Image (cartoon, rainbow, N blue to C red):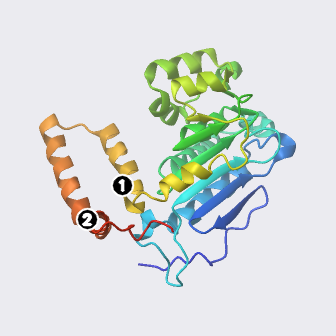
Amino acid sequence: MSNYAIEDLKPETSLCSLDIEGAVAHLTLRREDVYNALNIQLISEIISILDWTRERSVGERGTLVDSNGAPHLRVLVLTGAGKHFCAGADINMMRDAGAKSPEENRADSERLDRLFNSLWSHPCFTIGKIQGVALGGGAGLIAGLDHVIAEPSTRIALSEGKLGILPAVIGPYVYRKVGSAQFRRLSMMAGRIAADEALRIGLVNQVSDSLDGAESSVIAEVLTTGPMAVAESKRLALTFDRWSGSDEELRTWTLDKTSEMRGSQEGQEGLASFLEKRPPNWKEE
């Protein structure tokens, strides 16, 4: 297996930034002059950071530290600089779409799909801090996160319908987040919903008057959980989403998976620490 050290050079970016604090990665969108609208360059830069952090996560490497003793990543926090989290697709990118060939538009859509899928399937526990508006692709980013914290004044919309198009690329992630009925309603109305409604339907998990440090208690809780258990929980949910076999086959699969995790290095450490009344080796002091 290749060595992916935390000290390796980070991807070169100019429209977003990556900061590492121990086992926590902070990804910040930095196109605040256009409300962090997603253009081709920003999308590509976010993907490169998601790939870089994925390769250096506990879930991907299977160890708590790299070969130099630096912590592998366990949490990723996504924020947007400035007044708004993300206003969706850049207006110039949408304008140019009309002049592009079907093949070029398909390539743009594939890039967007990779962005949302990379966030949705990231091995780390992902947290979003949302202020201002999150429209279209901004709502798609929210749907790919594990825990979303929003300010009371935040407004979120699947706004594509206002332009006569569909939230198709972000659709699978929003659908999984809020369910069929809410996805249908939000995509057809295409209007902005307030933070309290987003909380009620499960698009947002927490509303906080201030985003400063609002994620700290969530991070602290996640860092007490087995890191591989976090990554495997995502795979577990995806398996349930895609299951096409019988109920009996599903029960057998869950038994096998439970046995696998109990016999794993992390599972054995967790059980031993419980019996010995000591913290497990992944829990920070």
Measuring 40% from the left and 49% from the top, which residue is drawn there?
234
Say above or below: 258 vs 63: above
Disc on the earlier residue, 1 or 2: 1
Say above or below: 132 vs 147: above
Image location (x, y in percent) of residue 36: 77, 44
Residue sticking out furthest to the bottom: 68
Say above or below: 136 vs 251: above
Image location (x, y in percent) of residue 220: 54, 55
What is the C-alpha distance between the residues marked 1 and 2? 23 Å
- Of residues 156 and 169, the one nearer the viewer is 156
Residue type at mark 2: give it: Leu
Say above or below: 259 vs 188: below
Circle 1 Cα neighbour tier, 10 Å, few/some/many (<14 / 14–19 / ≥20): some
Image location (x, y in percent) of residue 219: 56, 54
Task: Look at mark 1 in the image and give the residue it sits on.
Answer: 232
Residue sticking out furthest to the front: 277
Measuring 67% from the left and 36% from the top, which residue is drawn there?
208
Secondary structure at numbered mark 1: helix
Task: Look at mark 2 in the image and give the residue it sits on.
Answer: 275
- Of residues 37 and 124, the one nearer the viewer is 124
Image location (x, y in percent) of residue 80: 74, 46
